[in-house]
Structures are given as structure tokens and as C-alpha cells.
Amino acid sequence: MIAFHLEQSHSYRRELGSLDERGRVVGGRAAARLHSAGRRALAREDLAAAANLLGRALACEADGSHEILWDLCEAVLSAGDTSKAATLVGSAWRPTAARIPGGMLAPPCSEGSSPT
């Protein structure tokens, strides 16, 4: 419940413009709580909940924590979505991966294009 409210506060602050230090702290706190809940869901093999919570945690984390990303990769791969897992793993190797709204990561590169 607290994670949800922190996440909402972070989201509203982000909608108002660039995040200040306090906004980043709120996002980090939301990410930590969502990550913890996601890991617990992963431990009990509730893969849909784990992917949802971990994806939301990643969206709140300013630097896109690799630990959250790897846990999300595990949840998505365990659920059998190999295409999405491959995209996430590719993003993990590229710290500057493009982020798109909703907390999802853009594919590392399209077919036929060279990596940047």
C-alpha cells in the first residue's frame, strides 16, 4: 500500500516537470518497496505479479537499477516470454538503453541497424 502511494507521488512529480532531489528520493523509495514486493512474488512463483511489480519498480528508479532489471528478466523468462526477456537482457547490457513511457524498455536496436 505504501509503495503504491510513493509510486503515485513520484508519477505526479514527474508529470509536473523534471524531478528535483526530493522527487528522485520518493522514486527511489517507491522502487525499493516495489522491488521487495516483486521479489517476494517471484519467490512464491506468482510470475504475473512479479513482472508487474518489478516493471513498476524499474519505472520509478532513476538510474534503472540492474538488480531490478535482472529480477524482471527472471520473472519474464520464467513466465515463458522469451522475446520480452531477450529485449530486457539486451537492455541490461546497455546502461543507456532508451526508456519509453510506462516503464518498459525500448528494444536495444532494430534488425538491420548497427548498435550505437
Image (tube, rainbow, N blue to C red):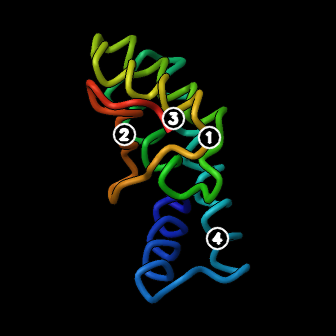
Between the C-alphas of marks 2 and 3, the distance is 8 Å
The vertical placement of 44 against 30, above or below, is above
Q: Give the quarter of the image for residue 108.
A: top left
Sort mark 1 into few (<14), some (14-19) or many (20+) by Cα contacts within 10 Å: few
Residue of label 3 = 38
Query: In which image quadrant can residue 77 be found?
Result: top left
Q: Amino acid at mark 4?
A: Val
Mark 1 vs mark 2, foreground winner is 1
Q: Earlier in the sequence, mark 4 or mark 3?
A: 4
Q: Which residue is mark 1?
A: 95
Q: Earlier in the sequence, mark 4 or mark 1?
A: 4
Sequence-earlier tag: 1 or 3: 3
Residue 103 picture location, percent across and down: 40, 51
Q: Amino acid at mark 1?
A: Pro
Q: Nearer the viewer, residue 1 or 71?
A: 71
* First in sequence: mark 2 vs mark 4: 4
